[in-house]
Amino acid sequence: MSTISEMTDVAAYAAQVARAAKDASRRLAVASGQQKDQWLCRAAELIRARGGEVLAANQRDLEAAPGYGLSTAAIDRLRLSIARLESVASALEEIARLPNPVGEIIDGSVRPNGLEVSRVRVPLGVVFFIYESRPNVTADAAAICVKSGNAVILRGGKEALHSNRALHTLLALALDEVGLPAAAVQLVETTDRSAVGHFLRMNEYIDVTIPRGGKSLIERVMAEATMPVIKHYDGICHVYVDRAADLEMARAIVVNSKCQRPGVCNAAESLLVHAAIAERFLPDMARELKARGVELRCCERSRRLMPGSRAATDDDYRTEFLDLILSVRVVDDLEQALEHIDSYGSHHTDAIVTNDLQAAQQFAAIVDSAAVMVNASTRFNDGGAFGLGAEIGISTDKFHARGPCGLRELTSYKYVARGSGQVRE
């Protein structure tokens, strides 16, 4: 494939990439599980062996980051390290250990006329994946797409271009070494924003688009895409501390949900506390959060119990901060907590801390989110934590996939009917 520097027409370049991906997807659909796993393991070996090249490329991106106006949280998402590269390599190996979903017989039956009807899992085809800031996602997305039999076109943000190129070089080398088509994983080599629009109009080649980034990106994709889209807009995640909560457990869950990695979509953005335990819980919680650098934006009742906090606005409860900022509200009961989550949440991840089984069951049944956590951190809504090996994103849609999108979420199915000459009367 020609590089973008050799091409003068972005539309022609995009069409060439998309056609190559379509051709590669046909070969991947019949590739063996063993061959795909060999690619994953070889890619992991190369990332470990040549990680220095990736880190050097990442350093170039980090040095340019201030010029793009990236926030502290965005720079953290951009940054790679030896430990993060090891996590990337380990994730590839974990995906290799997962069962191959392609060809799985979901169910089947034999009709009275002897016709054998099966529902068989198949790849979606070609995935156009758009993402920002996080170069480790380059490897994760490629791995999960190829393992599930899909070709992928990767369009990362300009702020991570050098890191993405370095990782893609290793992924492509591993594809070639194991005999899989190089076009199974392609990186869009231009930062021209118009390229995205061209890809979004190529539904004859691309089967699904997955945007992973800010709300403006996702809104653009939804407005322009001519193929199905798997997405989530915001991660406005709540932790509700019930009147029957173990307060020490609640403290640990709130701290982890907010502070463990605040710049990701499953970090808590809002804390709701039952009025019956607010006076016992909030002052100590405030001291712990303030010690960790968290800015608190509180309702009138919670502000009296959390010294140093500021008054929350209505918009604060609707904001995905992606930073060490937390909105807080005291609620009168579980019903008011549920109403708040329904009004202000984004259907991503919401947690309850309680020892009341009935309250937990009611929360889990009523909260309409992709993941509901009971006595656990919101940070667990993640492909790896849920045993999927990795994810290409977390969907807040209800069709075709919801929650962490792993291997099965990147497949569909077809009916295969086997007969012995049957004809319909």
Image (cartoon, rainbow, N blue to C red):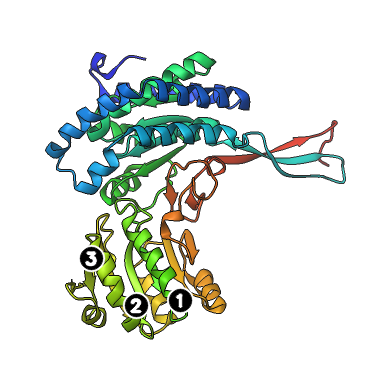
Residue 310 seen in this snapshot: yes
The amino acid type found where label 3 is placed reads: Lys
Residue 55, by quadrant, is top left
For the point 52% across and 18% down, the residue is 180
The amino acid type found where label 2 is placed reads: Phe
Residue 148 seen in this snapshot: no
Residue 413 in the image: x percent, y percent?
A: 62, 41
Q: Earlier in the sequence, mark 3 or mark 2?
A: 2
The residue under label 1 is 245
The residue under label 2 is 281
- Please, what secondary structure does the residue beneath circle 1 have? loop
Front-most of residues 223 and 138:
138
Q: Earlier in the sequence, mark 2 or mark 1?
A: 1
Q: CA distance from mark 2 to mark 1?
A: 10 Å
The residue under label 3 is 290
| Residue closest to the far left | 67
Report if the CB atoms under discs 3 and 1 are less than 8 Å apart: no
Report if the CB atoms under discs 2 and 1 are less than 8 Å apart: yes
- Looking at the image, residue 35 sits to the left or right of residue 270; the answer is right
Q: CA distance from mark 3 to mark 1?
A: 22 Å
